[in-house]
Amino acid sequence: MDDTDPLSFYLLSITTTDFGIGFWISVVVLVLLLVSSALISGSEAAFFSLSPEEREGVDVGNEPYTETASQLLRQPKDLLAIILIANNFVNVAIVILSSFIFDQIYPANPDLIGVDYLRATIEIAGITFVLLLIGEVVPKVYANRNSLSLVKLMSSPLNFIGKLPPFSWLKNFLVNGTEVILKYARKRQIDVSTDDLENAIALTREESTSPDEQRILEGIVNFGNTDVRQIMRSRVDAIAANEDITYAELMELILNSGYSRIPVFKDTFDNVTGILFVKDLLGHLNAPPDFEWQKIIRQPFFVPENKKIDDLLKEFQEKKMHMAVVVDEYGGSSGIVTLEDVLEEIIGEITDEFDDEDIVYTKVDESTYLFEGKTSLVDMYKVLEIDGKAFEESKGESDSIGGFLVEQSGRILRNKEFYVFENFKFVVESSDKKRVKMVKVIKL
């Protein structure tokens, strides 16, 4: 057998090498480093895969590790930097030590000219396989199933590593460097306006896209730009109950309205004291006439007129509520807004068996429409199939057609008086001393 053959040299070196104490110490250290790599890699998956319930348990727990773990979780960037730096240091040490041990087991053949491909393949593939299996895959699979146990085990070691130089220096450098890069990236990012998104949707419209799908897309684009006052039901149209009415009068009000939630006020609608959930009355259907129904009303939820409806939707979800009382800048009640009103801005009108099916507008011909003065401008845009940008830019605090005409003309227009805005002519069909009741809108 040729002595220069790599396999023959490998077998010969295994049988003739006498491993000393340094070799075995290196093996023990290598095993400890692999265990450390596994624990650090697993802790990354453990800390960042905690469920909300487990995270809350860590924050409010009384065990020794909870304070340290909670502190680490409150600074996720620092925690991730500590884990990555420590893991890289350990992995580099593993590679160096593995190479030293491998040189003892399979020393380089001095008689071989060129690259010992067998030796290089065994060394690279072996070290890579061990690092991936023991240092990444196995610990992270285990950590996903036992995240809380690993958080409990690794909180103190990671906290200690984060305060120990040079790891602390590298951690600060990495976190601060990342912030600088992100700050620069934010300056370079492209700002896309709502108009750009609307144009993009219009350009990408396909024949297979239905009008309903197109309306939903446009509703999503404009969702964050709509104020609560644009979709609310005004106080004059809201159904509400006075605290002073009897139980029999309340039941009659509920039957006539058909609503499942009714605002309750004391003296005037400006003083809303609660929301009555009709389902709360189910257990009191046979109650006597003097039943004190006021005791079962729930706390009201107040929102300002200028609140964006995307923020309102989040609050509805967080508070698990479906109705809010809209207040103006002086604290008076302007009206009410419901979860249904918010969703209708995206998916269109939602009707049920209790909704009023009366037509709120009349289409006289292809260019003429008849609206009630209290009809919101947003609803008018939908009927006329316009974007309403010109109206939104010109209007002030008004949100209804009648309010817009009063605002633009500076007074309450009388019957048959008109006002022209853009390519629309608004003719007042009916009005009194307080408001515009009926308006004819003509496309010029």
Image (tube, rainbow, N blue to C red):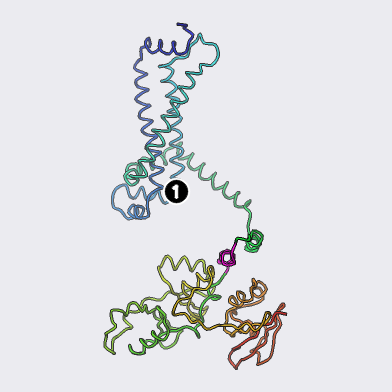
379 vs 405, nearest the viewer: 379
* Image quadrant where residue 224 sits: bottom right
Q: Where is residue 420 in the image (x, y as percent from the top left)?
A: 71, 82
**Location of residue 397 by image quarter:** bottom right
Which residue corresponds to the image point at 40% horizontal and 50% vertical from the top-left?
73
Location of residue 126 with respect to 73 vertically, above or below: above
Q: Which residue is drawn at the image coordinates 44% and 48% (left, top)?
A: 76
Q: Reply yes or no: does residue 223 show up in magenta.
A: yes
Q: Quickly name the residue at label 1.
A: 76
Question: In this orientation, which residue lies closer to the viewer: 88 or 443?
Answer: 443
Principal SS element in the magenta part? helix
Picture coordinates of residue 314, whole percent (x, y): 47, 65
Type of residue at label 1? Answer: Pro
Q: In which quarter of the image is residue 372?
A: bottom right
Taking the spot 38% from the left edge, 11% from the top edge, the residue there is: 17
* Depth order, front residue of 411/136: 136
* Quadrant holding the C terminus: bottom right
Whether 98 is drawn above or below 35: the answer is above
Direction front: furthest residue: 208
In magenta, the rendered stretch is: 209-225
When the figure is inspected, residue 218 is found, relative to residue 303, above or below; the finding is above
Q: What element carries label 1?
A: helix
